[in-house]
Amino acid sequence: MIAEAGLAALWLAATLAGLQLLLAWSAVAKGNEDARRLIRPIAVAQGVLTCLALALLITLFLRSDMSVLLVAENSHSMKPFIYKFAGAWGNHEGSMLLWVAVMSAAGAAVALFERGLDQRTHVATLGAQAAISLGFYAFLLFASNPFARLNPAPADGQGLNPLLQDPGLAFHPPTLYLGYVGLSVAFSFAVGALLTRQVDARFARAVRPWVLGAWILLTLGITAGSYWAYYELGWGGWWFWDPVENASLMPWLAATALLHSATVLATRDALRAWTVMLSVVAFAMSMVGTFLVRSGILTSVHAFAVDPTRGTFILALLGLYIGGALALFALRVHTVNEGSRFDPVSREAMLVLNNLLLCVILGLVLIGTLYPLLTEMMGVRVSVGPPYFNTIIGPITIALMAVLVVGPLLRWRHDDPRKLLRRVTPSIALAVLALAAALILSAGRIGWLPALGFAAAGAVAIASVLPLWKRNLLRTPMFTYGMVLAHLGCAVSLAGMAAESSFSSEKLAAARPGDTFEIAGQTVRFDSVIPIAGPNWTAMQASLTVSRDGEVIGTARPQARFFSDPPTPTTESVQMTHWNGQLYLVLGDQLEDGRWQLRIWWKPFVTLIWAGGALIAIGGALALIGRVRRERRHKVQARKPARERFA
Amino acid sequence: MKRSLILWVPLAAYLVFLVVASLGLTQKNQTVIQSRMIGKPVPGIDLPAASAMAPALSTKQMADGKPRLLNVFASWCVPCAAEAPQLAQLAQRGVRIDGVAIRDARPDVDAFLQRNGNPFHRIGLDARSTLQFYLGSSGVPETFVIDGKGIIRYQHIGYIGPQDIDTILTKLREAGA
Amino acid sequence: MRPLFIFLSALMLAGPALAQTALPPAPYADRQLEDPAQEAKAMALMQTIRCLTCQSQSIADSNASMASDLRSEIRERIARGEEPEHIRAWLIERYGDWISYKPTADPILWPLWAAPLVLLGAGGVLAWSRIRHKKVRA
């Protein structure tokens, strides 16, 4: 009964979405007042129904109802509670339901809480949101029904692969999903604003919290994914420019650009057309990312969890929504006033530069990712990988950091270049210092890109906190702290990347018990190897004692694991974290002569990479809280249009 | 006028993406890496015998006028066992098959041949995939058709099923058998 | 999402086709060359050679047996004094451009190298014209 109720809830929600679209059209195009009044409750009801459907699916998983196909294929009655729970979205159908549920819940939130927009634009926005949701309802109901029954029901499920039973994997995909869906709201706002020709500061203020929220989640998702790859794959790499990684990076880049241009629009009422464009692009990138991952066209050899009809469906939705929005943009946007004007030396100009560089990076990631597909059509198979992306995107990122140093220190509209020079002096001084230190420490053997990375990190570190200089710290708005923290996070992350790529040391060794190895001032002693067994794996476990200056600082137990079903060998690496880096230890195969392979890396300050990512996300969260609170206060104070102070 | 043209650029770029993506979807995915050595002479390498049941293999002596198959296999590879009946059938029809056992050990190859029969004329042991790299081969099993002049004429990637026998025979005929 | 994808690919390929050999790895698969300069050369090359059996990783960070054999092959060749680019060319001759992550000078890749210039140029012109334009009118 639960499955049928879930399916019924979905159908009902889909019907409501259709109704919502029709009513929105009637209200916006015909000025139908009755229709307008009905839209909000309908949007809320739709959100409630889809969340109910999701809750029902989770219930089915928790109860291990094997008469439901999805549960039987992906779950097992003996599975730990947390993975039964997360198993509900650990598959295609469930994750699409999660997507739809979050999307409708977001629509309901827009209906309930958004008060800044004028009513027509608000209604048009809800109409756009309903239109997107409709496509995904169709996808869910016609091509990926999560509630399909299995008859006869099997005694038990096929289980979730042991490797998937990782807390990181249970929550990593939904984090990215929530980010993608948040950008769908930005898209709906943009379409609504284009339809009613109300592209102005109010649009920017309405869209900003959603973009911020989505951006925080994407930042967290990418950071967590990178760390996961780092410790799980056992080779110490943290970014591979793999198509699936790029798919998650592209929406983040677009959202970062949008975040900054929305600030210009909200504060200075400039960059109207550009901000609308970016809102469309950000959601387009989310869909493109989903398409690339789900259709499997890029990772052709892994044509497994991929169903061509799914790819076709997502592509059709992509064509319909993004194509439609871009056409609307081209037709409508010239009726949008260009907005306020500004000088080449102004904060706006630097934010334009920021947007330009971010979009160039985005374009290059997209082109680089799709290029092998393009050449394959001409019968040539090529690989575009780290050597290309690092060479091209590295320098542009450094340029972006230079903009970051200058931008926040400039005034809006117009500023004096000579005063600017005085303000950036400390940053330049630290950049030179960092560069010199890097050159001296590496004895001049550092690559030019990491060297510039150190310089940029130094400059950004100073520049990011300068906006707090000589300010009353208690009265500084929270979103300014958010900006400071996020920019500081960039410096921290960049420093980690530069340190890891230029000062890492590697020790590959064949070892017998008793052997010792020196790496980065530490001594690793190989004590023993013993066989051990877990519930569904066996492993060889090494015992390694790490000491410095004769003093034992820890014991590491890396494993070479073998999962029996399906037969999968994995390496369980061990990371020993010190304040100045990580010791990364991996146990490899046994050699003919009985010795064991050991892979040991010293990765100085590598943790800064993810610490920086976390700082960026926390900064985003502060900015979000600060913005929402300020909007609230404005609404309470007066109904007059809020004019923001210079942030 | 100029400005309004620029406004259509995003849509145009997007349409290009859509075309590429939909062509990518309809295209039959190539999941294997074809060797570039087809049409070139077999690289000459001496390999030790992989088994007590067949002599060692030197790919330097393949230009002896007789076309043959060079089968890249391994005792630890399950599809290799699955293609054994097809290889036996080919051998029965008079096809000369030389084998290369990849990353293998002699006792394992012996056991493999006892289990699955021995269609091979000679078998070389390629303990470190060296010949594989020279051939531009990217996995096991793979089968190369080599003509009488020692030129590689055709590469069959993956397991030879009953449905592939005709193709292999045709390619051998084209190579002068 | 990448780990998920790697895992899934492992899951699908973990069948017989990729069953790995029990043979111990080749001598230099996971052993550094004695000369640090040679090792650095070899490592730089290995990081740009694509793994044949895992597809989306370089051979420098893959556990596949073919990748470890190729690592050993590359290290031994470097130790014998062969130049990295010569080894790359040798591999491309056998497997095509696909095996090298480092884009070659093949004309089919020219647009890829032109892309950053074109994007930066077009974006720069667009942004600059807007800013100046506004200043003149202001």
Image: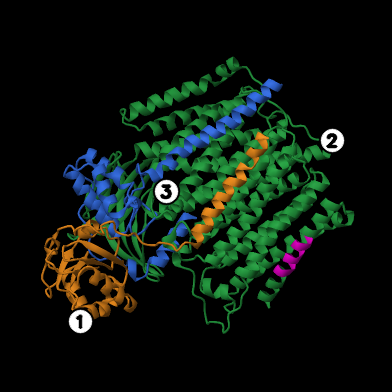
Chain colours: A green, B orange, C blue
- Asked whether A369 or A602 is in front, the reply is A369
Amino acid at circle 2: Lys
Up-down relation of residue A539 to residue A278 (above or below): below
Up-down relation of residue A475 to residue B11 (above or below): above
- Please tell me whether residue A11 belongs to the stretch shown in magenta: yes
Q: Position of residue B50 (x, y in %)?
A: 15, 69
Report the magenta residues as a range: A10-20
Report how far apart the C-alphas of labels 2 and 1 lie in the structure: 93 Å
Judge depth for marks 3 and 2 and give the one in front: 3
Report how far apart the C-alphas of labels 3 and 2 lie in the structure: 50 Å
Mark 2 touches mark 1? (CB < 8 Å) = no
- Quadrant of the rendered image containing residue A582: top left
Kindly tell me whether residue A617 is visible in this rendering: no
Q: Which mark is residue B143?
A: none
Mark 3 touches mark 2? (CB < 8 Å) = no
* Residue beneath the point at 20% across and 40% down: C35
Chain ID, mark 3: A
Check disc 1 and report its element: helix, strand or loop. Answer: helix
Check disc 3 and report its element: helix, strand or loop. Answer: loop
Q: Which residue is mark 2?
A: A640
Q: Position of residue A409 (x, y in %)?
A: 60, 24
Looking at the figure, which quarter contains the N terminus of chain B? top right
Please give left or right for residue A638 compared with residue C21 in the image: right
Amino acid at circle 1: Gln
Q: Which residue is mark 1?
A: B92
Mark 1 touches mark 3? (CB < 8 Å) = no
Q: Residue furthest bottom?
A: A152
Q: Which residue is mark 3?
A: A240
Instruction: Have a look at marks 3 and 2 and say if they share a chain.
Output: yes
Q: Position of residue A36 (x, y in %)?
A: 85, 54
Q: Residues within 10 Å of mark 2 (few under 14, many from 20)?
A: few
Up-down relation of residue A242 to residue A607 (above or below): below
